[in-house]
Image (cartoon, rainbow, N blue to C red):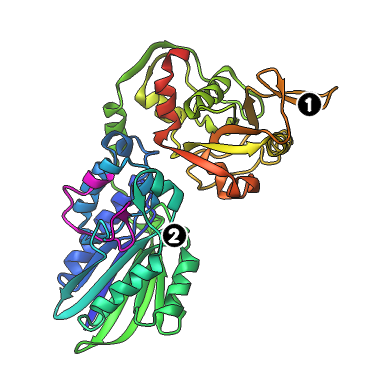
Amino acid sequence: MEVKLFHTNDIHSHLYNYLKIKDFLHNKKRQHKHNMVYVDLGDHVDRSHPYTEATLGKGNIDILNDAGCEVATIGNNEGITLQKEDLKSLYDNADFDVICANLREVGSESPYFRPYVIKEINGIKFGFIAATVEFTPFYKALGWEVSESFDWILEAIREINTEVDCIVMMSHLGRYDDESLAMMFPEIDVILSSHTHHYFEEGEWIGDTLLAAAGRYGDYVGEVTLEFDEKTLVGKRARLYDTDLLTSSDDHYYEMGRDMLSTVIKDSAAPIERRLYSTSSFITSLARMVRLFTDSDASLIHTGLIVKPFEGGMLTDYDLHKVLPHAINTVQIELTGRELKEIFSQASKHEFKDEIIRGLGFRGDIFGCFVAENIGYVQSEREYYINGEVIEDRRHYTLGTLDMYTFGRIFPQFRYSRKVYKMPEFLRDIVKIYSSEL
């Protein structure tokens, strides 16, 4: 007997692709009837889409229901781009099980969601376990804990190992953690892998464990075929379906989201220009807003944050969302004067200005140039100034900037600095707070 596992991951609200996947899954359900299950591995929600923004992800849950999802876990976009109470209510109307072994409230010793679920398909018992990536400081800023995922997975395996015929790991930990899981826990039969946007055309093997992954944005939908002799798993294989080859469906969700984001922020707002290689009045104002919001001595952002220009006039939530669709929060970083000068010296070189940036919450394309606020440099004196005073090497200062800079690539110095993440407000939320300056 064969059982089909269909899986999606990292859709990131690319609903045009996902609607094709939904129709595909409906056809597969008619074909395989009770011999299939469909699961989603998280990051289905992405607030860069107007419909997701307007419904705070609940619209995505309705669409997952329509697709016949039976089990889902959370990715970092569900976990850290929503306020705590919004995540708690996100799945209120879900027709599927939501599992995650390593998400818990700060101070709690038990997972917030169930760590696993057991499902019986034609007499075969499947144990589905899930875990999400450990973006620990971001979760802590929202009142969550996600650490020690492998320990929580081990505990789940021990609880269900003798009760099920097949263990399926639904992982939003990333490819390299998933490879480690396969080596450490041979009890896992299949690892459905996500988060790092990789894909395996026919799966990958580590020992006797099959890894399957379906890329990103709904470019693919994954299928794992499991063959059983009685209740013994005797064969497994994976494949991908390219959604470009699937029949298109009408996508009306963008227009729905646009209409839902019609609240007016300001009746007569100034135009917002998109300049990548020079500053503008808006990006300068945004840098000031970041400094004020983070209560810092100076601030640093980049011009590529402006994704779409705004012609001026009546500014709505939808207009601002187009300008700043990012899942980016701000952060206050404590630095010595010497470190602060190093950062601004490095920023002034604009080494990333032509780079295409992916991930890190950034929803634009080209990075652009850095823009600093409330810091000056007098070249003839080779001195940096804050509030008209020379920056002293040993004195401590605070810098208001973007959380995407703290992942280590752009400014490695930030990794070990004292940081206070300002969550859950995105940049567009901060603009609304200071909308009188527009």
**In terms of secondary structure, where does tag 1 sit?**
strand
Q: Which residue is mark 1?
A: 383
**In terms of secondary structure, where does tag 2 sit?**
loop
Classify residue 343 by image quadrant. Answer: top right
First in sequence, mark 1 or 2: give its number. Answer: 2
Residue sitting at x 47%, y 14%: 437
- What is the residue that sits farthest to the front in this orientation? 394
Mark whose residue sits in front, 1 or 2: 1
Q: Which residue is mark 2?
A: 215
Q: Which residues are magenta?
A: 87-109
Residue 141 spot, x, y in % from top left: 40, 43
Residue sitting at x 24%, y 46%: 88
Q: Amino acid at mark 1?
A: Glu
Residue 223 visible to an observer of this rendering: no
Residue 250 spot, x, y in % from top left: 28, 43
Would you say the residues marked 1 and 2 are in contact, meaning their CB atoms lie under 8 Å apart?
no
How far, Cα to Cα, is label 1 from label 2?
Answer: 48 Å
Q: Amino acid at mark 2?
A: Gly
